[in-house]
Amino acid sequence: MKNLIIVLALVAPFKLISNNIDVSAVSTQGIDASAGTDNPANFTHVEFDINWDNSWRSSTGSSNWDAAWVFVKYKIEGGTGCTAGDWQHATLSATDAHHSVQTDNGVVPDFAAAADGTGVFIYRNADGNGSIDWDQIRLRWNYGADGLLDACEVTIKVFAIEMVYVPQSDFFLGAGGTEPGEFEDATSGSPILISSDGSLTLGGGGAGSLGNNNATGQSGGADDFNDASSQTLPAAYPLGWDAFYCMKYEITNEQYAEFLNTLTAAQQAVRASTTTAGNYHGNSATPVARAGLKCQIAPSGSVAGVYGCDLDEDDTYNEVGSDGLGIALCAISWPDLTGYLDWAGLRPFSETEFEKACRGNQLPVVNEYAWGTSSVHATTYTALTNSGGESELPNSPSASASAGNAVYGTTHSSGPLRVGIFATASSTRVIAGASYYGIMELTGNVWEDAVGLGTVAGRSYTGIHGDGSLNSLGHADEDYWPGINGNNYASTANLVYGGTTGVTGRAGAGFTGGTYNSTAWLRVANRQYSVWTGLTNRDVRNGGRGVRTAP
């Protein structure tokens, strides 16, 4: 055994305030430089503790579980024969059995490693619910595959994002209503059952085709098919019948700050709204729309800047009680979102995956929201309790129990709220505003981008995952992602990355799920903006989340 020198093991906990996922005690444990079929590359174990609240696994009902998507970043600091560099994505073993826990505290974990080595899903191996507390999780890092020598001195960061497993199953598209562009079975006005992955006929009115209410009411841009004109959805498009993991929460201010803090100065310049020290996200002197993300130290030349959260404007950063760490990130563009997802080893979801994530395999309810009813509770409130903190709530939170979710009424217009704001260990799906599978805020809080199927550009998407790194200019660079190579033309297919311009356009991406200041677009079946022909911008209503196809 040789010794890989670890200078410092930093932890980037992604301590999402709503569920308290936390990573601590990061270290590395030995190395193995031997050869053999079981060890194609030199490896070490990245060790850490992880815990979070309100975990579950159930083999009945929704038949799913929550999980942590864990990935590792490293930076070479020096060492004999080693050149100091920027943050890079660590290659973890693709073999489940190579990952383990030393102390499970009574709840045994399962490991599902990504085949491309970008990360590992960790989750309960048996039915149960409650808090997770696993000590000394060990993930095998094949550092030899990353080109590191045994003598390299490195700093590492461990990241964890809470995800929800959406199992393989039949599901419905559309709810039998009259929402703009609502999916239907041919021209029947009824929901259509999706019972397998594979190609589909879009429009044309024939039996078994996927209709769209004749594209009525799509003001953002209309589908290129209708009752009289058909298109074909390729089998490679991620329809949603197969299993996938979805982020339980929208990306938060804290998560995006940690993302920025691993980028180069040049990458930060395009992925941050501000590169001016003291300015907030949006290049303002004060937070706009509760966007407490702030440039703490400006990037200078080749030296990267530092970003944090300071919603209360006291120049003390990342205070869990007041700085809005867990508030849903807003005012990001499609290139910003895809940059984050590529960096995290995730991908954008399709609009059909969105509908499945909301209603699961259940019969649709006409005019339903993600929590499964057609009611939305628009309680009037003008203040927040514990504003910006880990227990942020509206000043009348009990009102949410009456008929839906109280956070999304038109009376709330100052900005998004803390992710998972109504979820507790005892809250019902309706009170929590949760989807069938337990995913939060799929309707409301911030607009979320989804890859639509109503254009040539959208239908060219194949669901390739992010590889953990961006191009040198700070853009996502994955093949066929909407807007790759600068594509802004809905009638032009997104192609293989050309090696220069990454995702700087948004052709093929639309908006779904609605936003914090209106109930107009919150219904699951609403496709008013599933096609968006406008150019890329940063709107204070825009946020997002990512998914990953299940290993």
Image (cartoon, rainbow, N blue to C red):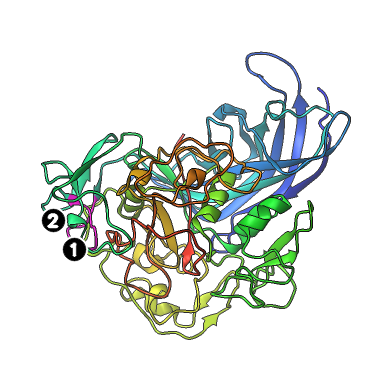
Provide the residue span drawn in magenta: 173-184
Distance, label 2 to label 1, CA atoms, is 8 Å
Camera-side residue: 150 or 426? 150
Please tell me how many numbered marks the rendered image carries. Answer: 2
Label 2 sits on a secondary structure element that is: loop
Residue 136: x and y in percent read 68, 41
Counting other residues with Cα less than 10 Å from the Cα at mark 2, is it few (<14), some (14-19), or many (20 or more)?
A: some
Label 1 sits on a secondary structure element that is: loop
Q: Say which residue label 2 marks.
A: 189
Question: Is label 2 in contact with label 1 (beta carbons under 8 Å)?
Answer: yes
Residue 541: x and y in percent read 46, 68
Task: Say which amino acid is labelled 2.
Answer: Gly
As drawn, the label of residue 178 is 1
Task: Say which amino acid is labelled 1.
Answer: Thr
Q: Quadrant of the N terminus?
A: top right
Magenta span includes 182: yes
- Quadrant of res 77: top right
Counting other residues with Cα less than 10 Å from the Cα at mark 1, is it few (<14), some (14-19), or many (20 or more)?
A: some
In this view of the protein, can residue 13 be seen by the observer?
no
Q: Residue at x 37, y 71 (%)?
A: 405
Residue 350: x and y in percent read 37, 47
Where is 4 relative to 481, above or below?
above
Q: Residue at x 43, y 39 (%)?
A: 463
Residue 59 located left or right of residue 83: left
Q: Earlier in the sequence, mark 2 or mark 1?
A: 1
